[in-house]
Amino acid sequence: MTKPLSKLEIKDAASVEIINATEQTSYAEFDHAKEKISNLKNDAAETAECLASINSTIKEHLARMEKIKKLDFNY
């Protein structure tokens, strides 16, 4: 037969269980946050590429407009 646990031993065992449960949740939340950050970095890189493409298109358009201005059509 086992000896009954004291209140202190019960509290210690409960504390260990709480710590273990909290630790697992914390790891899961941390992994989820890391994944979200990675996704945000990928989205930011994709957005930067799109903005660079738009900027290039605008510059090309402005260059064509300057050429048209210089042609001076007089009718």
Image (spheres, helix red, strand yellow):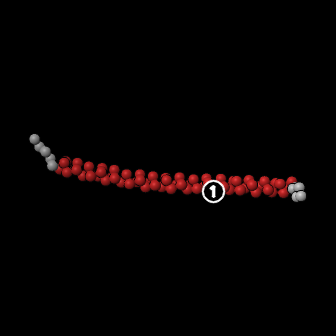
The spot of residue 57 in percent (x, y) is: 30, 51
Q: Which residue is mark 1?
A: 27
Report the residue at 71% width, 56% height from top: 20
Q: Badge 1: few (under 14), some or many (20 or more) residues near its Cα, within 10 Å?
A: few
Report the residue at 38% width, 54% height from top: 49
The spot of residue 63 in percent (x, y) is: 24, 52
Quarter of the picture holding the N terminus: bottom right
Quarter of the picture holding the C terminus: top left
Residues 34 and 65: in front is 34
> Image quadrant of residue 26?
bottom right
Residues 47 and 28: in front is 28
In this image, 24 relative to 63: left or right?
right
Report the residue at 49% width, 53% height from top: 39
Q: Secondary structure at mark 1?
A: helix
In this image, 70 relative to 26: left or right?
left
The amino acid on which the numbered mark 1 sits, given as a three-letter code, is Tyr
> Image quadrant of residue 17?
bottom right
State the residue lying farthest toward the top: 75
State the residue lying farthest toward the front: 1
Q: How many marks?
A: 1
The spot of residue 14 in percent (x, y) is: 78, 53
In this image, 73 relative to 39: left or right?
left
The spot of residue 46 in percent (x, y) is: 41, 53
